[in-house]
Amino acid sequence: MEDLNTFRAGDEWESQWEANKIAAQDECMMEVDNILMEVEHIVHDLDQRLHVQNTRVLAKAIDQLEELINYRYVDPYNDEPYDYVFTKQVKRALQDGLSFELGED
C-alpha cells in the first residue's frame, strides 16, 4: 500500500514530467529538423522523385526520425530522465519535409 511519501514522490515526478515536456519537444524537434535538413534536398520538390543511389541515405534518415518518436529527455538540473512520445509531431515533420507518410503502429 502506498504511503503519503510515496504518493508525493510520484506526484512530484509527474509534475516534473509535465514541466519538461515543452523543453523535450523542442529538443526532439530540433533533432528532427537537423536530420531533415541533411536529406530533404535529395527528394525532388516538383515530382517527388528520388535517385536510386540516395535510397539508403533517405531510409537511414527516416529510421532515425522514427526512433525519435519515443524520446528520452534528461533534465539538465537534476539529471533525471523523462520519456515522451512525439508521434504526431514526427509524422507531421516527415510529411512536410519529405512527403513521406509514416504508417500506423
Image (cartoon, helix red, strand yellow):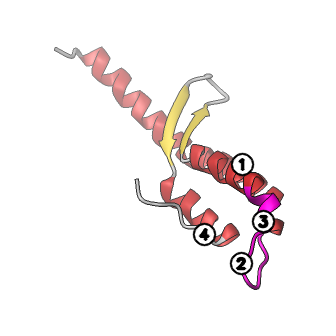
Magenta stretch: includes residue 50: yes
* Disc 4 target residue: 95
* Disc 3 target residue: 40
Between 101 and 79, the one lying in front of the other is: 101
Single out the mark in the foreground, 1 or 2. Answer: 2
Magenta stretch: includes residue 44: yes
Q: Quadrant of residue 58?
A: bottom right
Spatial CA span between label 4 and label 2: 12 Å
| Amino acid type for the residue under numbered disc 4 | Gln
Q: Secondary structure at mark 4?
A: helix
Between 9 and 28, the one lying in front of the other is: 28
| Highlighted magenta segment, given as a residue range | 43-55
**Rendered position, 69 above or below 12:** below
Percent coordinates x, y for residue 24 in the rendering: 60, 44
**Rendered position, 11 above or below 42:** above
Single out the mark in the foreground, 1 or 3. Answer: 3
Single out the mark in the foreground, 2 or 3. Answer: 2
Spatial CA span between label 1 and label 3: 14 Å
Q: Secondary structure at mark 2?
A: loop
Q: Residues within 10 Å of mark 3 (few under 14, many from 20)?
A: some
Tell which residue pokes out farthest to the left in this image: 1
Spatial CA span between label 1 and label 2: 23 Å
Q: Residue at x 82, y 59 (%)?
A: 53
Q: Are marks 4 and 1 in contact (CB under 8 Å)?
A: no
Dominant SS in magenta: loop
* Disc 2 target residue: 48
| Amino acid type for the residue under numbered disc 3 | Glu
* Disc 1 target residue: 31
Q: Residues within 10 Å of mark 4 (few under 14, many from 20)?
A: few
